[in-house]
Image (cartoon, grey):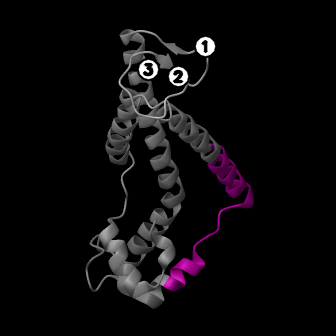
Amino acid sequence: MQDNAFHLRTEGTLLFQDWKLNSIEVLIGAFFITFLITALYEGLKIFRQWLVCRPLRLLFKDICHSTSTSLDVLDTEDACSNKETLQRLFVGFPNRSQRWRIKIHTLQAFLHTLQVLVGYVLMLIVMTYNVWLGVAVVAGAGVGYMAFSAIFPDDLRLQQIEDHEKTLDLNELSC
């Protein structure tokens, strides 16, 4: 019978009827596997966001560096602070080929499907109402976010983008 309250027992079933938690060693193994899956799930989410925003960040950097010799984008004399210059360059930025966009879209669709699948598996693990497995999911999410957000940093400082959005009215640049 499935519990409807959180419990600390070391016995139970995990996802499938044949996957039995019948000892503390098996529960510890399930804890670490769940922790790892959750951390990788967070990494997948951050990687997908990085993958989507990367072309915009590269465009923004290219525009800023091609119009100014200064590397400081906060400089008030920088060409990036000039709305007309940035919009002219944004319109003239070369488009990617249709085949490249299809490949990226297919990759994004696959990664999205994988993310949904893993998310539902993690939800079902939490729905076992085992406190230890719930802790593994929460801890894995925190550690995964901390680790993978450092691996895939935001190339542009978000504060600078927000400052430029007010000036440039190009909301597509903030991911």
The numbered mark, 2 or 3, whose residue comes first in the sequence reads 2
> Pointer 1: what residue?
18
Q: Is residue 38 magenta?
A: no
> Pointer 3: what residue?
30
Which quarter of the image is occupied by the N terminus? top right
Q: Find out whether the residues at labels 2 and 3 contact each other: C-beta distance under 8 Å.
A: yes
Q: Is residue 79 visible?
A: no
- Residue type pointed to by label 1: Asp
In the image, 89 versus 166, the foreground residue is: 166
Residue 167 position by quadrant: bottom left
Q: Position of residue 32 (x, y in %)?
A: 38, 23
Q: Report the magenta residues as a range.
A: 87-110
Gap between marks 3 and 1, in whole Å?
A: 14 Å
Gap between marks 2 and 3, in whole Å?
A: 9 Å
| Crowd tier of the residue under label 1, counting other residues whose Cα lies within 10 Å: few below 14, some 14–19, many 20 or above | few
Q: Is residue 105 magenta?
A: yes
> Pointer 2: what residue?
14
